[in-house]
């Protein structure tokens, strides 16, 4: 997302109405949040790891 923001949208400003980087910045924030906190208790990865450990 950083490449998309800086290569395409940075010159258009922040807001999406001007084809800006607002949406790309939101996607980047969500991705970093999931990377930091993990998918959670209802994730498929957690269910698979619990089944494999039994």
Image (cartoon, helix red, strand yellow):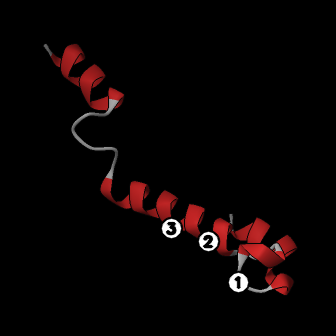
Quarter holding residue 16: bottom right
> Is 38 displayed left or right of 21 in the figure?
left
Q: Position of residue 44 (x, y in %)?
A: 34, 27
Of pointers 2 and 1, the one earlier in the residue sequence: 1
Q: Are marks 2 and 3 in contact (CB under 8 Å)?
A: yes
Q: Which residue is mark 1?
A: 14
Determine if residue 6 is in view: no
Q: Which quarter of the image is occupied by the N terminus?
A: bottom right
The residue positioned 84% from the left and 83% from the top of the image is 12
Camera-nearest label, 2 or 1: 1
Secondary structure of the residue carrying numbered label 2:
helix
Secondary structure of the residue carrying numbered label 3: helix
Mark 3 vs 1, N-terminal side: 1
Residue 25 marker: 2
> Going 86% across and 71% down the picture, which residue do you hit?
8
Q: Nearer the viewer, residue 50 or 30?
A: 30
Q: Which residue is mark 3?
A: 29
13 vs 42: above or below: below
* 10 left or right, relative to 15: right
Q: Locate residue 15, reporting x and y percent.
A: 71, 80
Residue lying farthest left?
54
Dot 2 and dot 1 residues touching (CB under 8 Å): yes
Crowding at label 3, few (<14), some or many (≥20) Cα neighbours within 10 Å? few
| Disc 2/disc 1 C-alpha distance (Å) | 9 Å
Q: Residue at x 21, y 15 (%)?
A: 51
Estimate the x, y position of residue 18 in percent, counting from the top left.
82, 78
**Looking at the picture, how far across and down is residue 9, in whole percent?**
81, 75
Q: Is there a contact, CB below 8 Å, between mark 3 and mark 1?
A: no
């Amino acid at each position: 997302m950083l490449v998309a923001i800086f290569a395409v949208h940075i010159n258009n400003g922040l807001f999406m109405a001007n084809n800006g980087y607002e949406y790309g910045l939101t996607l980047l924030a969500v991705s970093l949040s999931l990377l930091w906190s993990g998918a959670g208790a209802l994730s498929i990865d957690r269910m698979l790891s619990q089944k494999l450990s039994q």
